[in-house]
Image (cartoon, rainbow, N blue to C red):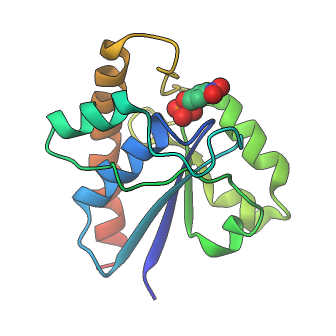
Amino acid sequence: MPVKILMVCLGNICRSPLAEGILQSKLPTGKFVVDSAGTGGWHVGEQPDKRSITTAKNRGLDISCQKARQFKTSDFTEFDHIFVMDGSNLKDVLRLAPNDKARTKVSLMMDALHPGQGVNVPDPYYGGPEGFDNVYDMLDEACEIVAAKLIKEHA
Ligand code: 4NP
């Protein structure tokens, strides 16, 4: 059984598609499955935001085949680790958690780098392209640590 990791943001079109692509690129295929979802349902079925696709492409990553979906309660049983992008996502996801086991699977993405500091991956949706580059840099650094930890844990 592969280890399953879910990346969660609000719309599942800007941050979590990047997080999915970046973490996937740092893990060996077969042993790990990475997916993403949004707490909101406005963009279900859509491709990632063009700016996320372009930012990823500039770094050699193709995320254009992803399709947005909404986070659902069954994701707590389906996935082993759930990473959320900001405090608001954390609140929304934890509100749906059926029990303690589900709750322990959830963590703030940037806690990988700055444990307990409450650092958010900022929502770049309403800003310019530089916001997407910043998000990519933050996620790349955090995913490097998460990937190393996962590989070590599941060697
Ligand atoms: P994301 O960004 O949560 O990083 O995918 C957003 C995308 C769309 C919206 C909000 C945030 N929206 O309100 O439509």
Residue at image location 55% in from the left, 50% down from the top: 68
151 relative to 59 in the view: left or right: right
Quadrant the C terminus occupies:
bottom left
Question: Which of the two residues, 91 or 116, is positioned nearer the viewer here?
Answer: 91
Residue extending farthest to the bottom is: 1
Please tell me whether residue 61 is drawn above or below residue 132 in the rendered image: below
In the image, is residue 126 above or below residue 58? above
> In the visual, does 141 lie left or right of 77?
left
Between residue 37 and residue 137, name the one nearer to us. 37
Examine the rendered structure and indicate whether residue 81 appears above or below residue 94.
below
| Place of residue 126 in the rendered image (x, y in percent of width and height, measured from the top left) | 52, 13
Specify the quadrant of the image occupied by residue 30: bottom left
153 displayed left or right of 6:
left
- Residue 117 at x, y = what percent? 53, 26
Q: What is the x, y in percent for residue 135?
A: 37, 27
Name the quadrant containing residue 88: top right
User: Which is more toward the observer, 116 or 61?
Assistant: 61
